[in-house]
Image: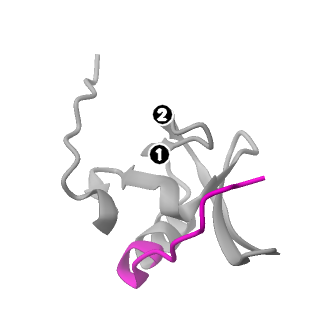
Amino acid sequence: MEHNSYQPIDCSFHDLLEATITLRTYTHLQYFTPLWEFTTITGLLKNLVSERGADGLVEYLVIDTGEWIRLDRVVNVNGTFAPPFRHYLDFTCDC
């Protein structure tokens, strides 16, 4: 159960996620887990899902591992930062 209120994401970033899902290519994704661990993966984005909870509608990104990631926790998709996280720096390397 999530204890933080869901914050709807920017429409243009939502469109980027939809376009990336449609391309069906491996994607560099950075996000925060429910425990606020910063995670970086490369995988396929499968779907966007909405679920109604006690606090209203919450949107999720489903990845190829079956994991559901809250959209307001997605930081970066292929080098494009979500608006709330634009000030973050990408310290990952391609090694």
The residue positioned 32% from the left and 64% from the top of the image is: 84
Place of residue 85 in the rendered image (x, y in percent of width and height, measured from the top left): 30, 57
Nearer to us in this view, 42 or 7? 7
The residue positioned 44% from the left and 45% from the top of the image is: 29
* Magenta-colored segment: predominant secondary structure: loop
Q: Are marks 2 and 1 in contact (CB under 8 Å)?
A: yes
Quarter of the image with the C terminus in it: top left
Identify the amino acid type marked 2.
Answer: Thr
Place of residue 62 in the rendered image (x, y in percent of width and height, measured from the top left): 68, 55
Identify the amino acid type marked 1.
Answer: Tyr
Q: Magenta span has 26?
A: no
In the displayed orientation, state which residue is furthest to the front: 3
Q: Quadrant of residue 3?
A: bottom right
Helix, strand or loop at label 1? It is strand
Q: Residues within 10 Å of mark 2 (few under 14, many from 20)?
A: few
Nearer to us in this view, 94 or 55? 55
Counting every numbered tag in the picture gives 2
Q: CA distance from mark 2 to mark 1?
A: 5 Å
Helix, strand or loop at label 2? It is strand
Place of residue 64 in the rendered image (x, y in percent of width and height, measured from the top left): 68, 45
Q: Give the left or right position of residue 58, taking residue 41 as reference.
A: right
- The residue pinned by badge 2 equals 39
How are the residues colored? one colour
Q: Magenta span has 2?
A: yes
Q: Which mark is residue 31?
A: 1
**Would you place residue 35 above or below residue 7 in this image?**
above
User: Which residues fall within the magenta stretch?
Assistant: 1-14
Place of residue 10 in the rendered image (x, y in percent of width and height, measured from the top left): 39, 78
